[in-house]
Image (cartoon, rainbow, N blue to C red):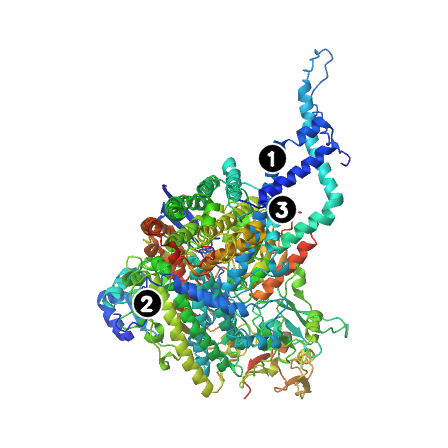
């Protein structure tokens, strides 16, 4: 059964060497680490510092920084509040449900802007949210030191995430391309009452309400109570967040393939 | 080995207690048998077909009934075979596979604990993953998960 | 030596009169047994010991402790934190990696010990299930004072991705008091060291 | 023994102190204070204090030395942030353990639990009163100091067993049992290896043994005995590869599982005290003690400090060897340990005794002398 | 000493995780043992039923935390079969590369833990140090050290960064030198051989009866490797040997794992060469919307059901670093899997503990359990 065994031959017992072989190996390592041990003296030297990586990579026999590329490390998030369109995609793509959309101070008090607030006590740093972000305003940075003595301090408000954005840490450059055959949002016209809710709440303003011709009603026929407008969705601007579907009171919007 | 070969080999001993062998990509087939033919099926699969290695036992709760499935491997044909039997939801029990495959022991303990399928004549049917005395069977569909309730946070006394 | 504070006298509470109890004047008076002199002296000596202790502690607290003793012991305590050597889940691997050649947490005097008796820091590195909860509490109680707890990673902080599960404790702070939370899933070894350094700053300001 | 010894220094110190103090008082008190017995007693106290301080500081520095060395063997740095290069690390550890809560498990035996570590510590400390560190260290004219040192050295497993048994823990108990078995197995070859040294040097006095090595150190002619002695010493010190009693992988912390706080610090400190004693014994018996090749003996005697420094350098180097072994070898199993002890070590040590006797007989020692001596 | 039961765990340096080995001992001899699992049972199979297909991947990394990418691959293979999706070829190659690097990382972790059990101190540090290099590679294309969330149904998240293959080759060169050093430290030492030879014997017959797989099975002389026997992914195109030893003891397991790392290096060089010359997409382009892209917009409930997405069953089996892992995914047409069931190799390996522990000494427990390579996360799930 074990004819072509590759690992069967054991190194022969050499009683003369006894314990000398491992001791010599350890001594060789000792001599090597006298020059420079592999240790990164952490609070003073950091691997995410590119200059330091270059220095240790060339140290003799110590490829510490060879494999490391830190650009796409998934650390704490950075949020650009200015470009955020409040599309909710991050909150809905989060598998751990750690993102809440909260009001950002400032702006129009009647229609406050909502931006993600992240609870780092729940976040699992999977990057689904930054992958889902259509505008690239929610990205992950290389910062990983998040220890705190208070549990409440682990919840990062949008303002705090914006401060991280402004520190100009290296950010995750990976942008996923959208699939080509993405579904679009379709309308089932007979149900629509033209209430404008979808157009009002669309984060990208890609829904415009256009007039539809009011049909002739025979006298006595029940006339539907509605506004004679219908949404038209601009597919190239649409980020497919589905806000319109969730706000539609009559459930007349649905996912589908546009012919 | 193809599903037809499996069916031919098994039908002699099982007769109409073999409900059929379906094609399953990546395996030799999916044998569906009646629960009362369990030991016969195990014996013939083990002795006659030569599937000597039991890899996995699992249960599925389809709300109206339950399904138990076994994954076995043969070193001769180098293929997997899946055995599956439907059990009624109110009396889900089946003969234990431990006399045939010793490795079924822990798998069946786990399946009993999580999906509430009792294995008759199991040598040691007690809790494996949950603490003793746990009365629920979490992988049933009726067992729902929810956000944890807020418990009191312990503070340092000094 | 400072003033001796008298031991607080135990107030003698008269037993409440029972229901329907009546004072009767013609009851014979019973003589109190005489307390021997030596016994009284013993009681006094016994009182002296706690009083002297208290005074001595007060003296230390007033002068020496704030400036010399407490900072010294705080310095010692924060520079030799022995964490409990145990691994719960994923974070345990990063916990081990923090003691590897690259990160080398021993630089800060952090040496994991296997016995809780010799530890002063419990790093809860992973998911805590209800099955292990009482063992965790036992281990915590076996550690001698002063002791600290670090919740490492999201599972220990609040259950993490598994907090909805039926078997998981939603955060170890429901079982034992937690001093520092380290976010991350799992935190990098550097982040763990950073958490311990944060704990050291807490110990530096310790007032006990 | 000429020159100033440490004991004579403390003797002088005591007499100066007491004479000065006595001169203040009138006659009867003056007479009492300058009593030679009292002076001698004070001298002993001073001497003991100096010894205690020296051994403690040396032990703590030894721990630092091990941590740094181990760090380099493991391709890392070791303690480095507390004090310069981590020198204060072990002081911080000790202070912290001093501050910790002292406790005793409820089911444990009170007397054994407390007395064990203390006795372990004390027996390790006593040996320092016997060991001559330099020619001018102590008067130490005990004719049997070597035997006394080894006898006290072998007390320790007894106390380990007592504390292990009384802490009422299965792991501790197993550690204690292993410790006892190990002691019995390794005491014999250790002593036999020492016999070889005694045969060659012709004395049980450590100082004499060292002086015998003035011309040539014993490690060359008695290499076999050295190997046996080092192996036995490793077992006695309970270090890898013979650290079964506190084998961390299977017995949680071995016999000190239930100990914490100051009692644990006692154990820790006593372990390293014993390591220090072991290294010192190796230096004394085989590496020529404070003697130095090319040094005129009288110079060393008249200036003991140089001898001490040279001695400590050797001691730390020997301890470095132990650390090296610890860094690169796995630990053996109980039965293997006993088998090695009875089946290999004892024949080897017997052979070394015969070898030593033969060497003495044929008077060919200078041939094997590893270092040429200027004097002879 | 009379017989007594000894609880080793849950907090014990031997366990490398959270489980309890109850052993019945007489003096130092083991008479009986009873592993007690479940201290880390997190209900991953149950939580998976509440998550959509890509979100289960985050759980897979935490299920087996030393071999996250291998478990992602396992789940993805089953999910793709259940969902009728085929990944592009380059994604398959990248997944195989992940598998093999993960095998090296996992075996290095095993090496570190195993030698520490034996009392060897510095090789623990060497193993962890070299594992960090592999983790650096992972970090450079997945963005995390241990929990990668890299593979997706229908491909992988992103392509490899520029210059990755050269870096990977450098690390492989470094590791090839280190394997020699590891062998010198362990096999070259007489004490190691005396401790590990004839220890924890588990014959091939017992292995099959108790369902033991992986390096433990191969160390018993049975040449079974799913990468050869049932080639999934692209393993048919690779040239490698199956590491086998026949002594069935701890040394044999050591030899098999060391040889596997060498074979992984050999495979990786082939894969890296292929990746250099075949650029292409890494995510299937004709994906149903909910599967490929990590978007999860509102109004998603019942999305696939409404569209009559075909139902399916998925079964996959991969050679994980610890042994054969299997996944069984039931797709009932919803966007959540109806049932996910995993088979962990360590689960079976531990359940056979009575066969390879009884009759040895207490001091032998750490090396034997170390050679089993316990990862409690995947046992308890």
Evaluate if marks 2 and 3 touch, with contact meaning CB atoms under 8 Å apart: no
Look at the picture and state if D343 lies above or below A226: above
Asked which secondary structure carries label 3, the reply is: helix
Asked which secondary structure carries label 1, the reply is: helix
Q: Residues within 10 Å of mark 3 (few under 14, many from 20)?
A: some
Look at the picture and state if B19 lies above or below C47: below
Work out whether residue D29 or residue D256 is closer to the camera in this orientation and state it.
Answer: D29
Work out whether residue A258 or residue E337 is closer to the camera in this orientation and state it.
Answer: E337
Look at the picture and state if A97 lies above or below C12: below
Identify the disc placed on residue D320.
none
Give coordinates of residue A47: x percent, y percent: 59, 72
Give coordinates of residue B123: x percent, y percent: 33, 52
Give coordinates of residue C60: x percent, y percent: 72, 42
Are both tags, 2 and 3, on one chain? no
Total number of numbered labels? 3
Question: Which of the chains bears the disc numbered 3?
Answer: D
> Is B154 on the left-hand or right-hand side of B18?
right
For mark 2, what is the residue?
A11
Q: CA distance from mark 2 to mark 3?
A: 52 Å
For mark 3, what is the residue?
D99
Give coordinates of residue D291: x percent, y percent: 50, 53
For mark 1, what is the residue?
D41
**The image quarter in which residue E366 lies:** bottom left
First-in-chain label (1 vs 3): 1
């Amino acid at each position: 059964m074990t004819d072509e065994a590759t690992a069967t031959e054991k190194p022969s017992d050499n009683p003369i060497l006894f314990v000398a072989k491992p001791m010599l190996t350890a001594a060789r390592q000792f001599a090597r680490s006298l020059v420079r041990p592999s240790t990164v003296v952490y609070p003073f030297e950091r691997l995410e510092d590119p200059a330091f990586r270059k220095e240790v990579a060339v140290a003799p026999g110590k490829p510490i920084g060879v494999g490391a590329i830190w650009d796409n490390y998934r650390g704490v998030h950075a949020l650009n509040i200015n470009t955020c369109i409040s599309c909710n995609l991050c909150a809905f793509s989060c598998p751990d449900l750690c993102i809440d959309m909260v009001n950002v101070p400032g702006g129009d008090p009647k229609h406050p802007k909502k931006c993600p607030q992240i609870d780092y006590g729940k976040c699992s740093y999977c990057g689904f949210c930054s992958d889902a972000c259509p505008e690239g305003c929610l990205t992950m940075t290389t910062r990983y030191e998040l220890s705190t003595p208070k549990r409440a301090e682990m919840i990062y408000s949008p303002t705090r995430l914006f401060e991280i954005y402004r520190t100009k840490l290296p950010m995750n450059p990976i942008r996923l391309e959208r699939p080509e055959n993405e579904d679009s949002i379709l309308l089932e016209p007979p149900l629509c009452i033209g209430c404008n809710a979808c157009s009002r709440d669309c984060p990208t303003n890609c829904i415009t309400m256009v007039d539809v011709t009011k049909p002739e009603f025979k006298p006595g026929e029940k006339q539907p109570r509605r506004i004679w407008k219908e949404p038209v969705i601009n597919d190239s601007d649409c980020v497919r967040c589905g806000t319109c579907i969730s706000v539609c009171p009559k459930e007349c919007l649905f996912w589908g393939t546009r012919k | 080995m193809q599903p037809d070969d499996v069916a031919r080999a098994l039908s002699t001993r099982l007769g109409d207690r073999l409900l059929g062998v379906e094609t399953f990509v990546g395996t030799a087939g999916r044998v569906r048998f009646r629960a009362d033919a369990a030991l016969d099926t195990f014996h013939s699969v083990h002795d006659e077909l030569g599937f000597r290695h039991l890899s996995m036992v699992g249960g599925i709760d389809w709300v109206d009934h339950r399904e138990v499935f076994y994954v076995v491997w043969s070193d001769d044909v180098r293929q997997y075979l899946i055995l599956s039997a439907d059990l009624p939801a109110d009396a889900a029990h089946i003969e234990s596979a431990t006399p045939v495959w010793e490795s079924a022991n822990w798998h069946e303990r786990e399946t009993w604990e999580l999906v509430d399928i009792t294995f008759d004549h199991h040598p040691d049917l007690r809790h494996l993953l949950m603490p003793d005395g746990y009365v629920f069977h979490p992988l049933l569909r009726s067992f729902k998960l929810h956000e944890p309730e807020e418990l009191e946070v312990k503070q340092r006394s000094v | 030596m400072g003033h001796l504070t008298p031991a607080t006298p135990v107030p003698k509470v008269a037993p409440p009169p029972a229901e329907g109890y009546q004072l009767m004047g013609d009851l014979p008076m019973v003589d109190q047994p005489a307390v021997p002199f030596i016994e009284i002296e013993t009681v006094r000596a016994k009182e002296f010991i706690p009083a002297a202790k208290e005074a001595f502690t007060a003296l230390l607290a007033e002068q020496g402790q704030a400036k010399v003793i407490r900072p010294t012991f705080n310095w010692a305590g924060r520079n030799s934190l022995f964490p409990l050597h145990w691994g719960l889940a994923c974070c345990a691997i990063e916990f081990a990696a923090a003691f590897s050649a690259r990160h080398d947490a021993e630089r800060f005097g952090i040496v994991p010990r296997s016995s809780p008796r010799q530890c002063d820091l419990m790093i809860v590195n992973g998911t805590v299930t209800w099955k292990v909860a009482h063992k965790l509490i036992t281990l915590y109680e076996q550690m001698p004072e002063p002791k600290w707890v670090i919740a490492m990673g999201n599972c220990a902080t609040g259950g993490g991705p598994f907090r909805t599960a039926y078997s998981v404790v939603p955060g170890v702070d429901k079982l034992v008091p937690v001093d520092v939370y380290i976010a991350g899933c799992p935190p990098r070894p550097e982040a763990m060291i950073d958490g311990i350094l944060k704990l050291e700053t807490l110990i530096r300001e310790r007032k006990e | 023994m000429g020159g100033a010894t440490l004991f004579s220094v403390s003797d002088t110190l005591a007499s100066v102190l007491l004479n000065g103090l006595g001169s203040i008082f009138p006659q009867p008190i003056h007479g009492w204070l300058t009593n030679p017995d009292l002076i001698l007693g004070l001298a002993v106290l001073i001497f003991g204090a100096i010894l205690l301080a020296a051994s403690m500081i040396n032990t703590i520095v030894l721990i630092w030395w091990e941590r740094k060395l181990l760090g380099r063997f493991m391709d890392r740095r070791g303690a480095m942030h507390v004090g310069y290069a981590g020198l204060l690390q072990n002081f911080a550890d000790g202070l912290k353990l001093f501050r910790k809560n002292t406790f005793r498990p409820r089911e444990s035996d009170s007397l054994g639990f407390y007395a064990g570590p203390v006795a372990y510590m004390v027996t390790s400390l006593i040996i320092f009163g016997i060991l001559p560190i330099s020619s001018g260290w102590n008067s130490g004219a005990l004719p049997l100091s070597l035997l006394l040192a080894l006898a006290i050295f072998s007390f320790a497993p007894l106390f380990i067993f007592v504390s292990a048994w009384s802490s009422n823990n299965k792991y501790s108990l197993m550690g204690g049992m292993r410790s006892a078995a190990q002691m019995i197995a390794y005491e014999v070859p250790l002593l036999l290896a020492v016999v070889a040294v005694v045969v060659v040097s012709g004395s049980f006095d450590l100082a004499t043994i060292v002086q015998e090595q003035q011309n040539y150190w014993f490690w060359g002619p008695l290499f076999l005995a050295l190997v046996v002695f080092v192996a036995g010493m490793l077992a006695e010190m309970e270090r890898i590869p013979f650290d079964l009693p506190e084998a961390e992988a299977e017995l949680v912390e071995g016999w000190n599982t239930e100990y914490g706080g100051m009692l644990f610090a006692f154990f820790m400190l006593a372990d390293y005290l014993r390591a220090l004693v072991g290294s010192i014994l190796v230096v004394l018996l085989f590496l020529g003690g404070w003697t130095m090749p090319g040094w005129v003996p009288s110079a060393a005697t008249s200036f003991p400090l140089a001898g001490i420094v040279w001695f400590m350098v050797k001691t730390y180097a020997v301890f470095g060897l132990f650390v090296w072994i610890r860094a690169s070898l796995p630990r053996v199993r109980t039965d293997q340990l006993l088998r090695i002890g009875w089946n290999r070590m004892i024949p080897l040590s017997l052979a070394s005794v015969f070898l030593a006797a033969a060497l003495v007989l044929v008077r060919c020692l200078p041939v094997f002398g590893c270092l040429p001596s200027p004097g002879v | 000493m009379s017989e007594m039961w000894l609880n080793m765990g849950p907090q014990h340096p031997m366990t490398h995780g959270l489980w309890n080995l109850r052993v019945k001992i007489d003096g130092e001899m083991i008479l009986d043992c009873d592993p007690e699992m479940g201290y880390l049972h997190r209900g991953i199979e149950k939580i998976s039923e509440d998550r959509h297909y890509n979100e289960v991947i985050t759980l897979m990394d935490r299920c087996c935390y030393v071999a996250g990418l291998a478990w992602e691959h396992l789940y993805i293979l089953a999910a793709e079969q259940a969902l009728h999706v085929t990944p592009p070829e380059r994604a398959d190659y990248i997944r195989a590369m992940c598998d093999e690097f993960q095998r090296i990382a996992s075996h290095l972790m095993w090496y570190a833990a195993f030698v520490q059990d034996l009392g060897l101190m510095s090789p623990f540090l060497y193993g962890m140090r070299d594992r960090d290099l592999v983790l650096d590679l992972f970090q450079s294309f997945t963005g995390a050290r241990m929990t990668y969330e890299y593979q997706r149904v229908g491909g992988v998240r992103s392509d490899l960064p520029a210059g990755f293959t050269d870096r990977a080759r450098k690390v492989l060169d470094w590791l090839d030198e280190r394997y020699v050093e590891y062998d010198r430290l362990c096999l070259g030492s007489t004490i190691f051989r005396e401790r590990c030879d004839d220890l924890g014997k588990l014959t091939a017959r017992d292995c099959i009866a108790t369902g033991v797989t992986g390096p433990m099975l191969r160390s018993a002389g049975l040449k079974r490797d799913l990468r050869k026997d049932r080639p999934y992914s692209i393993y048919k195109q690779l040239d490698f040997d199956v590491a086998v030893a026949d002594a069935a003891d701890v040394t044999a397991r050591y030899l098999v794992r060391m040889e596997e790392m060498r074979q992984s290096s050999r495979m990786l060089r082939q894969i890296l060469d292929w990746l250099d010359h075949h650029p292409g997409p890494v995510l299937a382009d004709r994906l149903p919307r909910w599967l490929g892209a990590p978007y999860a917009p509102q109004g998603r409930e019942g999305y696939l059901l409404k569209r009559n997405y075909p139902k399916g069953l998925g079964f996959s089996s991969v050679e994980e670093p610890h042994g054969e892992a299997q996944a069984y995914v039931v797709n009932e047409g919803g966007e959540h899997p109806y049932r996910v069931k995993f088979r962990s190799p360590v689960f079976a390996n531990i359940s056979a503990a009575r066969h390879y522990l009884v009759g040895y000494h207490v001091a032998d427990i750490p090396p034997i359990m170390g050679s089993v390579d316990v990862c409690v996360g995947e046992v308890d799930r």
